[in-house]
Image (cartoon, grey):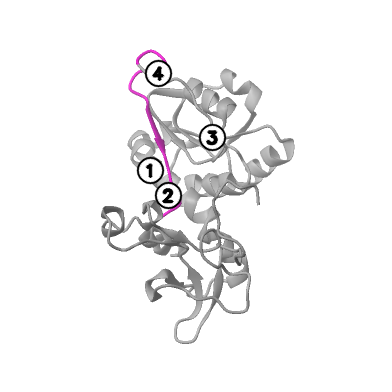
Amino acid sequence: VEGVFPSPLPMVLGHEVTGVHAELGPVMVYAPWGCRSCVQCDRGLEMMCADATEAGLFADGGYADRMLVKHRRYLAPLDGLDPISSAPLACGGLTAWRAVQHSLRDLRDRGSDARATVIGAGGLGQYALSYLRLLTDAHVIAVDISADKLDAAIEIGAHQSVHADDLGDVAPADVVIDFIGNDPTLINAANHVARQGLVIVVGLGLGRIPFGFGAVPHEARFMSSVWGSRSELDDLLA
């Protein structure tokens, strides 16, 4: 609608899709359909394929009675999960899952001394907060500008919630995951990450910050994280 993606129109929207397959029963649709012949597809990273055709973005999605899926491998059996409540796992849940997976080595190496900060406590951020509590012993901090979202973060299990304007008063984190990705949140992330820490940018805020020796903490690493792989979807559903 906003023109961020050059989607062909008309098109059926919907890329967080669950449905019923005649043989497999209730399934979740893996939406990034790759070309299946490039390096990324060979590695099982079809969400990074330059010629991917994402359902609901570049191919007809799930807001319909029936949906044509390019290949059976893109159907993940739900194995008893409720199709309605689990549907957001197909994008929001999977995107947060992959981002947290990138952080696990750093956080597990430090055990209970680890600190993880999630910037943006909306839908994806709330998934990440849950995963961090389930998969690590880190002290988990939620950052947002919304009091309601900060309250929700504590209910989900965050140890601490902080308004974005006050993050400078908080001790540095080993891992910072930014689900907004605009200039202010990236600046906050760069200022908040510890030396040799990791910043993972997920949000599509199109922000930019200076990078170079002295511009960020020593040996801090910055990376983006994109959606999730087909195998990661299986791990998430399990």
The residues tagged by marks 1 and 4 sit, at their Cα atoms, a distance apart of 19 Å
User: Which label was assigned to residue 217?
Assistant: 4
Q: Are marks 3 and 1 in contact (CB under 8 Å)?
A: no
The residues tagged by marks 2 and 3 sit, at their Cα atoms, a distance apart of 20 Å
Q: Position of residue 227 (x, y in %)?
A: 45, 51
Of callouts 1 and 4, the N-terminal one: 1
Q: Amino acid at mark 4?
A: Pro
Q: Are marks 2 and 1 in contact (CB under 8 Å)?
A: yes
Q: Which residue is mark 1?
A: 102
Residue in view at x 44 percent, y 71 percent = 76
Local secondary structure at mark 4: loop
Local secondary structure at mark 1: helix
**Foreground pick, 87 / 62:** 62
Q: Amino acid at mark 3?
A: Leu
Q: Which residue is mark 2?
A: 98
Asked whether residue 131 is drawn in magenta, I would say: no
